[in-house]
Amino acid sequence: MIIPVILSGGSGTRLWPLSRALYPKQLLSLIGEKTMLQDTVLRLASTEDIGPVYCVCNESHRFLVAEQLHEIDTNIGGIILEPSGRNTAPAAAIAAMLIAEKHPGATMLILPADHVILDSVAFGAAVAAGKSAAEKGELVTFGIVPAAPETGYGYIRASVTNEGNKGVYPVLEFVEKPDKTTAELYLASGDYFWNSGIFLFKTEAYLMELEAQAPSIIFACREALQKAVEDLDFLRLDVEAFCASPSDSIDYAVMEKTTRAALVPLDAGWNDVGAWSALWDVHVRDDSGNVKKGDVLVQDVKNCYIHATSRLVTAVGLDSLIVVETADAVLVASRESVQDVKMLVEELKRKERDEAEIHRRVYRPWGSYETVDFSERFKVKRITVKPGAALSLQKHNHRAEHWVVVKGTALVTLGKNTITLSEDQSTYIPVGEFHRLENTGLTPLELIEVQSGSYLGEDDIIRVEDRYGRQ
């Protein structure tokens, strides 16, 4: 049996302003109707002998990950929460230990959650080609057949004339991102492949090799798993033990050092969507070479990617630009400079700007809220509560709130009393009063919240009861 392990811990800063720390690219619908995480799961339908899906993600993304997996009826084996990002080697080690215990003898397929693979049938065939090698103890990686002398990827050189197993080749070396001249030589040789970050191996083979090459990672991960706590759909790793692990990738920790590395060529329309220019590459373009998403109107524009999310975006006389609009930010960049978007994000972080972390619309396990307007002593939010969901029982020390229901029916706890509010009805929550909002209906509940007070920060919440396990 092949057990998929989806690594969903990235932040995707090069795709800002759509991708942000608390809502990264793998949780966005960038190519089709489904999110990148969901597409990663759904393409497994073309792979034989697939078992339950395990996912490793950042703790702050846990409810979004769980909801998206449930939306597509995923057979979930477990959702492992990383208290801190430690790169891919520790994440894979935790998953391998857990799978070895629950599915002895299984083969583990490591998949990044944020890649595009257009041909799922070809992907399934590549996995099938690598399975027999993995079952013999080889550590299989998938090398993307290069389509151009790309300088933004690492490369893997394989012995393509020495075919030990059908379609599986011994790895000779891993090489860093090359310059253009070197990349052209790699492409011409036929021996080099782009490093995909996709792996297939037996759990025990990976753990044995990791223990030989990076024992400190194994030690920390074993302790983190031994002290882990189950919480709803999630497995919470011990914070201190996991954070003690060195931060290292599977490539550096194992694959570059092992003598058992093997490569399967993958030619399946792969793209790691590492920047806005990659989205321009993978989308169907119009006759002028443009990709237009959302409410976009252009005149004399060519070779551009223009994405509008909340309003009309117009453009005149542009060539080879990226324009991305969200409710609180606009990005304009040349297609050749989009790798530098991460530098803008770093600057936003240094200035402690919220735009680096969150969108105007913030997702919670019970639904979402969107800030409509704000000033020094007031804030207006639009709140949506999913059917059957409820906010925590809480109070605020510095702000009062006024709720107006605009759609659905709300069950409101206010102190010792409980009231029901229908559309166009409202209630007032004084400073320091315990309260809860619940949607007992079958349709989403929508309301407008007006906050007023001396401090309106999101940390002014004292929870006394929460069904989602939040502090």
Image (cartoon, rainbow, N blue to C red):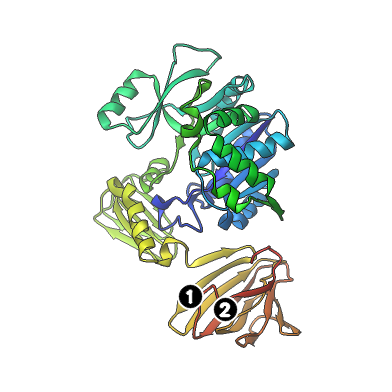
Element under disc 1 = strand
Most foreground residue, 22 or 229 = 229
Q: Is residue 259 above or below residue 44?
A: above
Whether residue 34 can be seen here: no
Q: Which residue is mark 2?
A: 448
| Percent of width and height locating residue 66 | 64, 53
| Percent of width and height locating residue 237 | 63, 50
Q: Residue at x 55, y 28 (%)?
A: 212
The N terminus: image quadrant: top right
Position of residue 235 in the picture relative to residue 249 (left or right)? right
**Cβ–Cβ under 8 Å for marks 1 and 2:** yes
Position of residue 149 in the picture relative to residue 440 (left or right)? left
Label 2 neighbour load within 10 Å: few <14, some 14-19, many 20+: many
Q: Return the mark for residue 391.
A: none
Q: Residue at x 35, y 37 (%)?
A: 152
Q: Is residue 391 above or below residue 113?
A: below
Q: Return the mark for residue 372.
A: 1
| Percent of width and height locating residue 184 | 29, 26
Q: As shown in the figure, which amino acid type bears the numbered disc 1?
A: Val
Q: As shown in the figure, which amino acid type bears the numbered disc 2?
A: Ile
| Percent of width and height locating residue 320 | 28, 48
Q: Is residue 427 above or below residue 143?
A: below
Position of residue 410 in the picture relative to residue 456 (left or right)? right
